[in-house]
């Protein structure tokens, strides 16, 4: 190729680079999520319109007013420094855009404040816009520490399993295991982590966990932190790990339903009515009136009762106490009582017997 041809190709390449540079910058800017506010200041009780672009399509976002934060540093205090009760959720359209009204509320910490927008599920993305809450206190931001910094080097996991007590509603417990490395310039001694548990789309409930030990610069350590839910918890949970105001890792946790509690209530619904029925029948049997002339057979035998009846002679009482039915081993002809009640040996008592004495004066 001639020198003039090379010059022409070089000029053409430079022109194309100049023309495509703005387009590349626009595409890169469009890929980054952005937030815009209808106004930059408002008082408590008013509302503003929050709009955004460049988000993931059909993504669920949470919009909050947070204190002690600036866009360059994010929200160091996490959602604990935000007005969570007055937050709003919104779902982006297919192009990653949204627009939502947000009530102005005072955060639990002083300003400078921002409107913080972050994804709830899926890949993490967040963006902030400066906002001033009228009448709210303003204090300087805490100084950044340039000492040791921890970074998670391996994937987190939850060790442990449920037992019989968990099956009956005891609090599920696991151990969050992960490896961190100190990427800073100074040692980190007894670091304090925040472990959060979130159910579904709700905000995490954070709890501080301190690890005892020292991590030197350039070194790593394997950490184990306990995680426990409330009694009877079940469903899809997410365990989050935060250090220095930044979320380092998240781990899903699918908690099974405590079927032992369900089994207990089923048995209770069967046993309790049966017991009440038996108690009721016993009460009815004791308080119901007896038929006229009826004799209670409990605790007293019939012969003894007949002998104690007033105005009844012993022989008559004994006869009354004799069962009316014939015993199976006696027939009517062989019944000893049929001969007039005499149990002695038979003898001749005819009136013509020679041994029978005669009255005086008889013919």
Image (tube, rainbow, N blue to C red):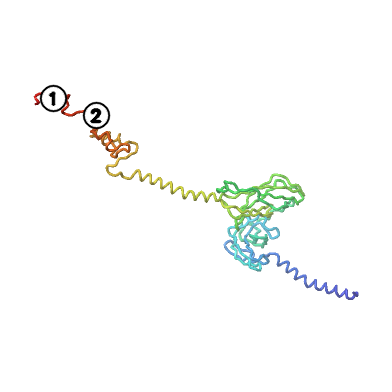
Residue 78 lies, in percent from the top left, at 65, 55
- Which quadrant of the view contains residue 304? top left
Does dot 1 land on a helix, a strand or a loop? loop
Q: Nearer the viewer, residue 66 or 1?
A: 1
Residue 235 lies, in percent from the top left, at 59, 55
Q: Is residue 363 above or below residue 298?
A: above
Query: Is residue 108 rendered to the left or right of residue 267?
Result: right
Q: Mark number for residue 358? A: 1
Q: Quadrant of the N terminus?
A: bottom right
Q: Residue at x 68, y 46 (%)?
A: 211
Q: Residue at x 70, y 64 (%)?
A: 32
Toward the right, the furthest residue is 2
Residue 329 lies, in percent from the top left, at 32, 37
- Which quadrant of the view contains residue 126? bottom right
**Residue that badge 2 annotates:** 346
Residue 121 lies, in percent from the top left, at 64, 60
Query: Is residue 345 rendered to the left or right of residue 107?
Result: left
Q: Quadrant of the C terminus?
A: top left
Distance between the alpha carbons at the discs numbered 1 and 2: 23 Å
Query: Is residue 351 rendered to the left or right of residue 50?
Result: left
Q: Nearer the viewer, residue 279 or 23?
A: 279
The residue carrying pointer 1 sits among few (fewer than 14), some (14 to 19) or many (20 or more) residues within 10 Å by Cα, namely few
- Which quadrant of the view contains residue 245? bottom right
Q: Residue at x 60, y 57 (%)?
A: 200
Sequence order check: which comes first, mark 1 or mark 2? 2
């Amino acid at each position: 190729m001639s020198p003039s041809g090379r010059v022409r190709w070089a000029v053409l390449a430079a022109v194309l680079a100049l023309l495509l540079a703005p387009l590349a910058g626009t595409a890169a800017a469009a890929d980054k999520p952005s937030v815009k506010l209808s106004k930059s200041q408002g008082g408590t009780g008013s509302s503003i319109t929050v709009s955004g672009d460049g988000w993931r399509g059909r993504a669920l976002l949470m919009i909050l007013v947070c204190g002690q934060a600036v866009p360059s540093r994010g929200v160091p205090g996490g959602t604990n420094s935000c007005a969570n009760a007055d937050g709003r959720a919104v779902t982006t359209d297919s192009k990653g855009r949204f627009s939502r009204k947000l009530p102005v509320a005072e955060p639990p910490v002083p300003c400078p404040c921002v409107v913080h927008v972050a994804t709830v599920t899926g890949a993490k993305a967040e963006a902030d816009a400066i906002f001033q809450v009228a009448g709210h206190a303003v204090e300087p931001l805490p100084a950044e520490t340039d000492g040791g910094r921890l970074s998670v080097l391996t994937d987190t996991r939850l060790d442990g399993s449920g037992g019989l007590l968990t099956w009956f509603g005891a609090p599920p417990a696991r151990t969050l295991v992960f490896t961190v490395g100190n990427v800073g310039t100074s040692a980190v001694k007894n670091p304090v982590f925040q472990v959060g548990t979130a159910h579904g789309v709700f905000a995490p409930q954070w709890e501080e966990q301190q690890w005892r030990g020292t991590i030197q610069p350039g070194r790593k350590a394997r950490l184990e932190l306990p995680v426990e839910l409330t009694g009877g918890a079940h469903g899809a949970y997410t365990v989050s790990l935060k250090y220095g105001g930044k979320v380092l890792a998240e781990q899903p946790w699918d908690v099974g339903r405590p079927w032992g509690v369900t089994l207990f209530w089923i048995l209770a619904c069967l046993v309790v009515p049966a017991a009440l029925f038996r108690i009721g029948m016993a009460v009815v049997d004791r308080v119901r009136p007896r038929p006229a002339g009826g004799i209670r057979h409990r605790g007293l035998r019939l012969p003894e009762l007949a002998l104690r009846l007033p105005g009844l002679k012993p022989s008559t009482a004994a006869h009354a106490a004799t069962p009316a039915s014939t015993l199976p081993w006696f027939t009517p002809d062989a019944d000893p009582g049929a001969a007039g009640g005499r149990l002695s040996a038979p003898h001749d008592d005819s009136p013509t017997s020679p041994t029978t004495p005669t009255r005086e004066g008889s013919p």
